[in-house]
Image (cartoon, coloured by chain):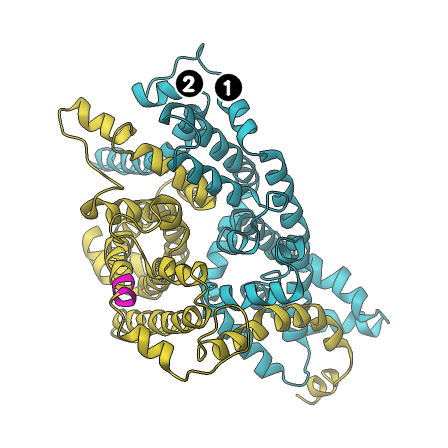
Amino acid sequence: MTTKRSRRRRSAVPYLFIAPFLVIFAAFGVYPMGFALQLSFTNWHGAGILKFTGLRNYRYLLTSPDFWGSLANSGIVWLLVVPVQVIVALAIAVVLMNSRFKGAFSAALIAPFVTPLVAMAQVWIIMFDTDFGAVNHVLGAVGLPPVGWLTTVAWAKPTVALLVLWRTTGYAVVLLMAGLQSIPPQVYEAAKLDGASAWRQFWSITLPLAMRTVSFVVVIGTLTVFQLFAEPYVLTRGAPFNSTRTAGLYLYNHITNSDLGLGAANSFLLVLMVFALSLASVRLLRPREGT
Amino acid sequence: MITLGRIGRYGFLLLVAAVSLFPLMWMVLSAFKPGGDVIARPFAFDFDQLSWTNFREMGHTIPIGIGLRNTMIVVLVKGALTLLCCPMAGYAFAKFDFAFKRVLFGTVLTTLMLPTLVLLIPLLLEMSELGWVNTFPALILPGAVDAFGVFWMRQIIAEIPDELLDAARVDGAGELRIFRSIVLPVIRPGLAALGVLTFINIYNDFVWPVVAVNDTDHQTLQVMLSGLARAAVVGQLGDAASAWGQLLAASTVAAVPVLIVFVLLQRHLIRGVMAGSVKG
């Protein structure tokens, strides 16, 4: 203990090592964050002096149907993405864990995650086009009428959600596999000796012990969905009838409208919501006993 | 019974892999087809019909070479900054005591949880104050030191035994020398994973670049691509047949470099993702 103390004496060394990080972090991380907080209490539009308006932005947003509408849109996309993703990714991860060619399959699964979002969003526009798209082409071939995937209120959200699911499920699978790998094999051996079926093993061992990773996947999914911007920006710009104007896109609209104070307030409200939602899902999915 | 289960299992995995890869392969193959064919026969591929026509037309509409160059500049400089600053800061956090260390590390952890969207507005204003709108510094400096990278490097470096570093100090090695010839080589696998993740993140970054630059000379590939998509939607590229050919060609150009890096280095990436989940 004493040797440790003396060795870790205060010197200039750590400051030199941390300086490059600190300069950039302070200038482009901490400073703008403080500025954003200050802006959220003003009605600034990008020029002139800051005029404080107290909580007016927050009050405006919390009573604005557009703000709640954007949150509701994100909420529906969340419902379409996260539960499906957890179930599908868990199934794939469990099957993949006990298979050969694990590396090749995980690579195939995570490839959509690394391809540029903007490029894939364009492929989505083309594949899901109402008049000429490949998907409606297939529907036509089996005698079904064309669907307005990106142009009708009913289908626009699911089509956006499908892109999110397709891009991020492989990432969830890899995360879950990391969690499953940490389960000691002895537990399964003991269960087999007791004659537990594969199905039983999944419910009594795999699922409870993987719950920490599952809640991590849920939190990442929540962050992704409530910050969703590029997908609806490229696919629909919020159309039709604002049905895909997600929380992230609504926030961006404040910038294009030069409502910068309002936008800053909106981003902090969004942070609070995302934080609350993440916390709630972690609580809800916490394993009942131990760990 | 066992073989039946095995067939089912690999059948399931093959199906999943096919769903995962299909849109990518369809994009690349369709980019070489005549635009009209993408519409009329979306799943047919006549190998004698394939050509570079779409790529040539797309090259006339957007200066994709400039976009590629801009992206490369940003990836290289920003990536180098990340790979330099993160392990250095991680070393300081892991192995030294200094004033305000706890407060500072707490701040790093907090920013880890904040969405990037929060910083969009103030950063944009900061850029215009500095006169950096439409410049490379605007694209490079914000986000150059990733809080996750610092946190992750700290975790890895903390696992290096103190004795190893002390032995070098006794031998009279300077701190910079220790960092270079002991710390960096030991954490090389983690550093490689951070490198791949950083490359992919910066290459695909869209939200900040689309806000920070709007002139062609500084637009990154992704921003240029979304501009092309917009032009297609409002009908500036002619009918769907010619617009789609160009869009598919541009998407392919944007996707191929990152896919090559991914195929070459995917093992590092998957290890990085897994490390992130266990440590995070």
- Residue B34 disc label: 2
Q: Quadrant of the C terminus of chain A?
A: bottom left
**Image quarter of the N terminus of chain A:** bottom right
Under tag 2, what secondary structure?
A: loop
- Farthest residue, direction right: B172
User: Marks 1/2: CA distance?
Assistant: 8 Å
Q: Is residue A136 left or right of residue B70?
A: left
Q: Looking at this rendering, what residue extends furthest in the bottom direction?
A: A2
Question: Which residue type does callout 2 highlight?
Answer: Pro
Q: Which residues are magenta?
A: A66-70
Question: Left or right: where does residue B84 sit relative to residue A155?
Answer: right
Q: In the figure, the cyan chain has which letter?
A: B
Q: Residue B234 in the image: state x and y as whole percent.
A: 39, 37
Residue that mark 1 sits on: B53
Q: Which chain is yellow?
A: A
Write the residue at 46% across / 64% down. A258
Secondary structure found at label 1 = helix
Q: Is residue A136 left or right of residue A167?
A: left
Q: Is residue A162 above or below residue A259?
A: above
- Residue B141 placement (x, y as % from top left): 64, 60
Q: Chain of mark 2?
A: B
Residue drawn at x 50%, y 37% is: B255
- Label 1 lies in what chain? B
A229 left or right of A134? right
Dots 1, 2 in contact, CB < 8 A:
yes
**Reading the chain from its start, which is encountered first: label 1 or label 2?**
2
